[in-house]
Image (cartoon, rainbow, N blue to C red):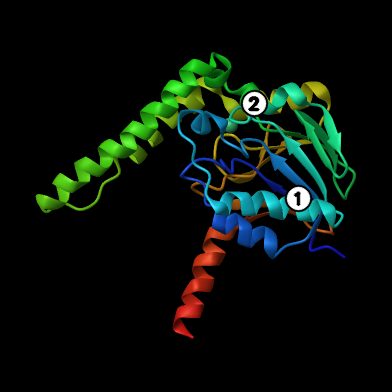
Amino acid sequence: MSDYKSIFISDVHLGSKGCQSKYLYNFLKSHSCENLFLVGDIIDCWRLKSKLYWPQEHSNVIRNILSMAKKGTKVTYITGNHDDFLRIYQPLELGNIELKEEHTYTTHLGKEFLVIHGDQFDIVTRFGKSLSILGDKIYTFLLALNKVLNFFRSRLGFGYWSLAKYLKDATKKTMNKMSDYENSLSDECKRRGFDGIICGHIHKAEITNINGIEYHNCGDWVESITALVETNEGEFKLIDWGLIERQNTKLLRSA
Ligand SMILES: [Mn+2]
C-alpha cells in the first residue's frame, strides 16, 4: 500500500533560481502515493524565456516524477499561469500522465473537490499577463536592490532587513484584498456544486473552511516548502517538508 492516497504539490517553479528542487526531490523520493497532482506553476516558463536556468537538480525532479508514473502512480499535471505554454496541449493523456486545466477529485470519503491552480480567479493575473510579468521583473529587481541596501546597512552597523519581503507582504495584502482570491474561489465551487477546492498560486499553504467550502492550498516549493496529502483514511494534511528537512539535518549534525 502507498504512503498516501494522494499527494498534491503546486508552485514548484522549476527553471527559476528560487525553486527548492533538492527539497522536492527528497520529498518525492521518500513518499509513495496512488495519485500525484501537480497543481500548476511546476515549470516557470516566464523566467526561462528571459534567461535559461536549468540545473541538474531540476531534471532530477522531472525524472523522479516520470519514474513514479512508470511504477504506477497516476500523475495529473494541472496547468498554471507560469506554465501556461502547456495549456495549448491540454487535455492530453500519455500513459499514466494527464495534462489538464482542472480536475474533479473524489475523496476517500466521497466528497467532490475541484483541483485547479487558481490564477483564473486572481484579478491581477486575469487582467493581463504583461502586468504580472512586470510585477515579476520588479520583484527580481527588488531582490537585487535589497542586496545593495543590506551591504550598506551592515556597513553602518544595522542588521539584515528584507526590502523585498516587506514590499511583498504589503502588496500581497492589498492584492489579496483586491482580488478577493479565496472568496471568488469558494463562490465558484458553490456555483458548480463542489464540496471543496484544492489549489495553489498564492504561495500560502492552508487548510480552512471558506463560506462552507473546504479550502486547501498546497503552498509552494520556493518559500514555504509544503505539500498537501490525503491519507489512506481520507484525512487531509499539510506537510511542512522544509521544517522536517531542517530537523533532520540538525539530527545528523548532532549525531
Ligand atoms: Mn500561479
Label 2 crowd (10 A; few <14 / some 14-19 / many >=20): some
The image quarter in which residue 1 lies: bottom right
Q: Residue furthest left?
A: 156
Callout 1: SS:
helix
* Mark linked to residue 213: none
Give me the residue at 37% from left, 27% from top.
138
Task: Identify the amino acid type marked 1.
Answer: Leu
Give me the residue at 56% from left, 40% from top.
13
Tell me if the residue at label 1 has its CB under 8 Å from ligand 1.
no
Q: Nearer the viewer, residue 3 or 136?
A: 136
Q: Nearer the viewer, residue 206 or 104?
A: 104
Cα–Cα gap, marks 2 and 1 = 20 Å
Q: Mark 1 = which residue?
A: 66
Instruction: Between label 2 and label 1, give the one nearer the viewer.
Output: 1
Q: Mark 2 = which residue?
A: 84
Quadrant assignment for ligand 1: top right
Residue 255, relative to residue 185: is it above or below?
below
Q: Position of residue 48 (x, y in %)?
A: 52, 33
Q: Position of residue 192 (x, y in %)?
A: 82, 23
Give me the residue at 56% from left, 54% from top.
57
Q: Residue furthest top?
A: 127
Q: Which of disc 1 and disc 2 is earlier in sequence?
A: 1
Q: Position of residue 176 (x, y in %)?
A: 50, 27
Left/right placement of residue 16 relative to residue 24 reads left
- How many callouts does the rendering have? 2
